[in-house]
């Protein structure tokens, strides 16, 4: 599979993903079916050897030795590269080993050779769904269901694909139709719960997860999903109990990694640091399709064994832009730790290079580059590849938290740490003056990435009307992406929103300076609001009920000056925006009084 460069907006922070996909390519039933396919007449000597190799491969798979199983399957393919069964076995082994790109290729080869074997289509569809190839997954699952209508696993997985495409109505209808026939299926009730939880309706979702667990108390997926519903509903202790009970029942390395990810985020939300920061290392687990795989010619720094003093340390930014600004709060600590005899090199998203370089003039900052290789995010750091002397060691940026922020009192009390250029700030202040009197308020309202459950973290623009119509304010658009329809709707309603003449997605130096020049920046916890807070701008952030960045406190330790408006439930938009309107009115009135007094 060829490498494809990944746009930065495609990479974002990890969040617990609803577990609904059913079936296992290496289940006992699946392996028995493969064994039966090998039990036919064995006339040719070569074919007998192929069968022997594949039986040995299946024996290895039964014991969980997927590397050995893969080697046996390859030996069979060396004898007969047209063996569809061998390709199928190899695909299963590669999938179970976390080599998803190779697994996809092997499944495709198997399906090409055995087009009538719908089990292969089912396995390939399940993997395609896990990797986000939703249209391909849907076609394969429909092909399977055409032969085996009413199959619970395939119908369930089709509903998962529809859910992930945000076709929630279709997903509900798909599940309801089969639940009418199979009301005792915990798998279907669980997936119905995930459709509701992805939309933010945790109370209804919880009811369906409870029903799945009533039907099967040992159902790990449902217990994990119930945990993800309980936490934002205020029951963090119950959520942690559910997660720890679910982990032993994980059906695959992927499920286990995702459950551990949810546990790490919950530990951080509970303020159990550095335990939560250490558990967060799971984000690099190779069984997570979105995990970063860095390609660096140096060992990873082990803080338990190696002092940083005098070292040439490379810090590699991870996940999305917002995450690099959150985790980047530890860069200065790392520079201090290496001392004057050492050197820190920092790889961040290219649009942030100038800001980090200005904030930390004693380190060398460059851009990293990400490609999708064999289905995995692979990250390179070109600017250090030809560096004279190389680097002694490297570390992922978020791993600095456990070292330099082991307790809450180690979070610095400062107003931002990425200062924008003073000349740009002055220029934007002058530009804003031309807009006339009133409080200048910058607005963000959504993310560029709205796939899957991420949509529940953002509101329709229509709900922002109370903020947009606050007397004594001038609204400034900071939202990147195509928002022309939203702006036209606002204008039609009599609300003027000024859009600055810059590229709001790419000109982040100007966005940071403009944010600081504004009286206030408001929005959900996305890159733009994190940029404003990191730059020291007055920032109001709408936070989600499961936001871990509070670290068990009633403040935002990463940005102490940030004012937040916390939603107590995912669907609590009107109340939250109403509170912002009230606060904004008070601020605008005070500002007007100050101007009149002057």
Image (cartoon, rainbow, N blue to C red):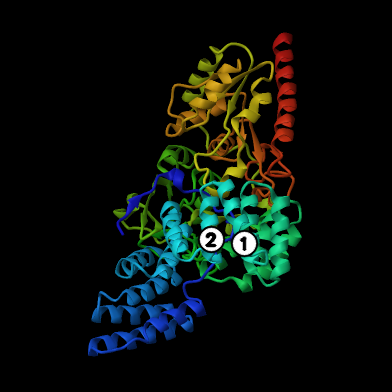
* Quadrant housing residue 573: top right
Q: In the image, residue 380 lies at what x, y percent? A: 36, 54
Query: Can you say whether 162 is above or below 483 in the image?
Result: below
| 451 with respect to 180 (left or right) | left
- Mark 2, other Cα within 10 Å: few <14 / some 14–19 / many ≥20: many
> What's the distance in space between the residues labelled 1 and 2, CA to CA?
9 Å
Image coordinates for residue 329, horizontal then vertical, percent: 56, 46
Closer to the camera in the image, 162 or 504: 162
* Left-right relation of 578 to 95: right
Q: Using the rendered image of the protein, determine whether residue 291 is visible from the camera's viewpoint.
A: no
Residue closer to the observer: 26 or 298: 26
Image location (x, y in percent) of residue 399 = 54, 58
Q: Is residue 460 above or below residue 555?
A: above
Residue 399 got which mark?
A: none
Q: Is residue 51 above or below residue 232?
A: below
Dots 1, 2 in contact, CB < 8 A: yes
Residue under the image location 72 percent in, 62 percent down: 211
* Badge 1 element: helix
**Element carrying mark 2:** helix
Dividing the image into 4 quarters, which one contains the N terminus? Answer: bottom left
Q: Disc 2 designates what residue?
A: 155
Residue drawn at 60 percent across, 60 percent down:
178
Identify the residue shown where x is 54% and y is 62%.
21
Q: Position of residue 188 (x, y in %)?
A: 62, 61
Among the 4 quarters of the image, the one containing residue 486: top right
Q: Earlier in the sequence, mark 1 or mark 2?
A: 2
Q: Which residue is mark 1?
A: 188
| Residue 322 versus residue 514 in the image, above or below | below
Q: Is residue 455 visible?
A: yes
């Amino acid at each position: 599979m060829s490498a494809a460069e990944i746009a930065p907006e495609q990479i974002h922070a990890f969040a617990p993903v609803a577990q609904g996909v059913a079936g296992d390519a290496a289940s006992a039933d699946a392996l028995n079916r493969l064994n039966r396919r090998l039990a036919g007449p064995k006339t040719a000597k070569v074919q007998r050897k192929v069968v022997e190799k594949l039986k040995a491969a299946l024996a290895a798979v039964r014991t969980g030795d997927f590397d050995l199983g893969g080697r046996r399957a390859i030996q069979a393919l060396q004898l007969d590269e047209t063996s569809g069964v061998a390709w199928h076995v190899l695909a299963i082994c590669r999938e179970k080993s976390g080599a998803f790109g190779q697994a996809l290729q092997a499944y495709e080869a198997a399906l090409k050779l055995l087009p009538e074997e719908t089990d292969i289509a089912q396995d390939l569809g399940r993997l395609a769904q896990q990797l986000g190839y939703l249209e391909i997954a849907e076609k394969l699952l429909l092909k399977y269901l055409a032969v085996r209508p009413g199959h619970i696993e395939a119908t369930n997985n089709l509903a998962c694909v529809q859910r992930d495409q945000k076709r929630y109505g279709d997903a509900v209808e798909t599940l309801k139709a089969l639940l009418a026939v199979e009301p005792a299926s915990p798998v279907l009730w669980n997936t119905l719960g995930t459709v509701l939880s992805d939309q933010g309706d945790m109370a209804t979702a919880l009811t369906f997860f409870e029903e799945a667990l009533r039907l099967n108390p040992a159902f790990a997926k449902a217990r994990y999903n119930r945990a993800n519903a309980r936490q934002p509903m205020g029951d963090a202790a119950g959520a942690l109990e559910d997660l720890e009970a679910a982990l032993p029942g994980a059906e695959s390395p992927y499920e286990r990694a995702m459950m551990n990810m949810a546990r790490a985020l919950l530990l951080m939300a509970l303020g159990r640091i550095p335990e939560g920061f250490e558990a967060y290392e799971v984000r690099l687990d190779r069984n997570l399709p979105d995990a970063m795989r860095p390609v660096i010619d140096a060992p990873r720094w082990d803080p338990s064994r190696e002092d940083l003093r005098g070292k040439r340390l490379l810090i590699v930014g991870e996940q999305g832009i917002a995450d690099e600004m959150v985790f980047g709060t530890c860069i200065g600590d790392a520079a201090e730790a290496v001392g004057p005899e050492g050197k820190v090199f920092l790889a961040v998203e290219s649009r942030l290079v100038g800001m980090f370089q200005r904030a930390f003039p004693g380190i060398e900052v460059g851009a990293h580059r990400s490609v999708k290789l064999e289905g995995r995010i692979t990250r390179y750091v070109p600017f250090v590849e030809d560096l004279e002397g190389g680097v002694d060691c490297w570390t992922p940026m978020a791993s600095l938290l456990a070292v330099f922020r082991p307790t809450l009192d180690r979070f610095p009390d400062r107003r931002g740490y990425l200062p924008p250029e003073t000349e740009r700030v002055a220029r934007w202040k002058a530009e804003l003056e031309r807009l006339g009197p009133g409080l200048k308020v910058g607005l963000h309202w959504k993310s560029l990435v709205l796939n899957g459950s991420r949509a529940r973290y953002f509101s329709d623009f229509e709900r922002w009307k109370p903020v947009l119509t606050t007397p004594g304010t001038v609204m400034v658009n900071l939202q990147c992406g195509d928002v022309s329809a939203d702006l036209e709707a606002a204008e039609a309603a009599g609300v003027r929103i000024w859009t600055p003449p810059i590229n709001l997605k790419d000109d982040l130096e100007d966005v940071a300076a403009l944010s600081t020049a504004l009286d206030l920046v408001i929005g959900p916890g996305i890159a733009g609001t994190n940029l404003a807070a990191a730059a020291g701008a007055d920032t109001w952030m709408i936070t989600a009920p499961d936001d871990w960045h509070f670290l068990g406190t009633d403040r935002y330790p990463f940005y102490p000056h940030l004012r937040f408006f916390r939603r107590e439930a995912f669907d609590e938009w009107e109340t939250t925006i109403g509170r912002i309107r009230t606060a904004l009115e008070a601020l605008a009135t005070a500002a007007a009084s100050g101007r009149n007094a002057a």
